[in-house]
């Protein structure tokens, strides 16, 4: 029951009607992109991929791409198959956290 409640809070468990998650999806998408930007130096990655004469544009470009990334994540999370997968992962993760990890959730090597 608890795992199902966790999945109910995942994007996949929300109504397919876009109005049911209009506020939640942008917030969740922005949070995911914020986590990437907080843990990855996007400007440095861009800089390393650019020729020397364009490297000064890496930081402004990283900032500009942030909005596009949020929109891309939002569109991805709005897809029914992704939403279903998100709910499945949430249920399984919750199961692993609430059961005997060694028995049920050990990764296969």
Image (cartoon, rainbow, N blue to C red):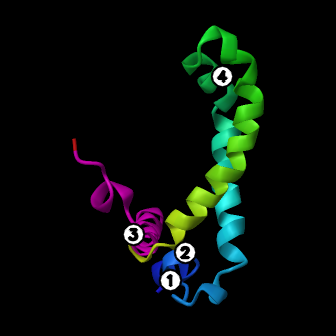
Mark pair 2, 1: CA separation:
6 Å
Q: Is residue 31 above or below residue 81?
A: above
> In front here: 41 or 65?
65
Q: Earlier in the sequence, mark 2 or mark 4?
A: 2
Q: Is residue 27 above or below residue 43?
A: below
Task: Tell me the mark number nearer the camera, choosing from 3 and 4.
Answer: 4
Q: Quadrant of the C terminus?
A: top left
Residue at mark 2: 10
Q: Are marks 3 and 2 in contact (CB under 8 Å)?
A: no
Side of 6 where 21 appears, left or right: right
Side of 88 where 104 appears, left or right: left
Q: Which mark is residue 85?
A: 3
Looking at the rendering, the stretch of residues picked out in magenta corresponds to 82-108
> In front here: 40 or 91?
40
Query: Mark 4, residues whose alpha carbon is within 10 Å: few (<14), some, or many (≥20)?
Result: some
Q: Are marks 2 and 1 in contact (CB under 8 Å)?
A: yes
Residue at mark 4: 44
């Amino acid at each position: 029951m608890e795992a199902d409640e966790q999945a109910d809070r995942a994007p996949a468990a929300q109504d397919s009607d876009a109005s049911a998650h209009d506020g939640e999806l942008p917030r969740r998408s922005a949070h995911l992109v914020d986590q990437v930007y907080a843990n990855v130096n996007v400007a440095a990655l861009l800089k390393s991929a650019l020729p020397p004469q364009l490297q000064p544009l890496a930081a402004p470009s990283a900032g500009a791409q942030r909005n596009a990334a949020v929109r891309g994540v939002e569109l991805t999370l709005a897809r029914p198959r992704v939403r279903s997968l998100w709910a499945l992962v949430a249920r399984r993760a919750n199961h692993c956290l609430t059961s005997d990890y060694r028995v049920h959730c050990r990764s296969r090597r």
